[in-house]
Amino acid sequence: MEKQIWDEYQIDLQSSGHWKIGPLHLWVTRFKNEWRISSLSNHDPDDRTIEIEVPFKLPLSEDLETNRFGGKETTPSIRFTPVLADRPVVIRPEMPFYLPSTEEVTIYVSTPLWLNITVEPHSRKLLQVPILRLSDSWFGPDPTEGELCYAARTKAKLRFEDLTLIQYRALTKIVLKNSSSKQLFLERIKVPVNNLSLYSSKEAGLLTETITIIKEDDQTEMKMRLEKPVESEFGKPSKIAMPREPLQKNIFLKAINTLIG
């Protein structure tokens, strides 16, 4: 049985823990008045290995990237919870395709999560660490118009069953509806994960709201709708995290390239 990442751990004084979560190596060391968090990533999006060593008995390398957090006195409890990325993530379909007029298509994507690290008392946040470090990507028609995003190497799937569920990734269902008289070319899709809530279910793991993107006419304006994942497809999802940047449920997007490229 695969070890569970999202949990509370106990770290003794002058002791460390080590977690390997896919491409991320994380070490946490507790002192009387200080926490130290060190990390290292191999940047491999296909690495699914989960390893947990608490306590970790080997010496830590001095070359690791380390963050230090001071305080009056530390307690043994440290908790890991999942959060979505702090920027939109750009996903590509397995192959670019056209969506004809009056047609719709559903695609499924997964995006890597960040690790939210808190300690007691009062669930104080120490650090948020991306489990997979994604490269930066500019999404927009030119350098003066657009948004800085992350670029994911994983591809969108047309069938839910073709998507591999991984503990450190969140699933998003996207419905694209072309109600205009012209076909749409779909090469890249911007998934606004920073505007989405995070849910959990036994059947589907971690997932977000369903995104519906509607092109209603021949103008550049589009409509985006966010809806809670449905039980008939994803079991009984429960919300575990609010959006980093909440949006209204239904918003109009002035340019088609704000979500589709």
Image (cartoon, grey):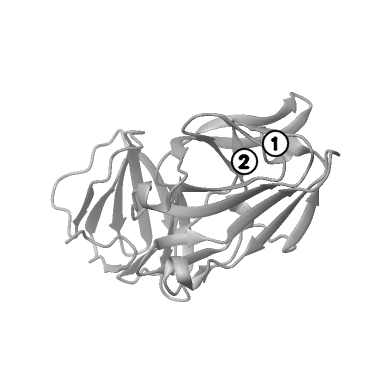
Question: Is 3 displayed left or right of 82 in the figure?
Answer: left
Q: Residue at 14%, 46% (x, y): give it.
A: 58
**Coordinates of residue 183 in the picture (x, y in percent):** 71, 34
**Coordinates of residue 12 in the picture (x, y in percent):** 22, 66
- Please, which residue is most extreme toward the right here? 219
Q: How many marks?
A: 2
Alpha carbon separation for disc pair 1 and 2: 10 Å
Residue closest to the eye, 82 or 58: 82
Instruction: Answer with the quarter of the image where residue 73 lies.
Output: bottom left
Question: Is 238 displayed left or right of 33 in the figure?
Answer: right
Q: Residues within 10 Å of mark 1 (few under 14, many from 20)?
A: some
The tag on residue 57 is: none
Q: Residues within 10 Å of mark 2 (few under 14, many from 20)?
A: many
Q: Residue at 28%, 40% (x, y): give it.
A: 47
Residue closest to the eye, 69 or 220: 220
Task: List the residue tagged with mark 2.
Answer: 190
Q: Is residue 71 visible?
A: yes
Q: Residue at 55%, 37% (x, y): give it.
A: 150
Residue type marked 1: Glu
Q: Is residue 72 visible?
A: no
- Please, which residue is most extreme toward the top here? 142
Q: Is residue 237 above or below residue 259?
A: below
- Please, which residue is most extreme toward the left here? 57
Residue closest to the eye, 6 or 68: 6
Residue type marked 2: Lys
Q: Is residue 242 above or below residue 43?
A: below
Task: List the residue tagged with mark 1.
Answer: 147
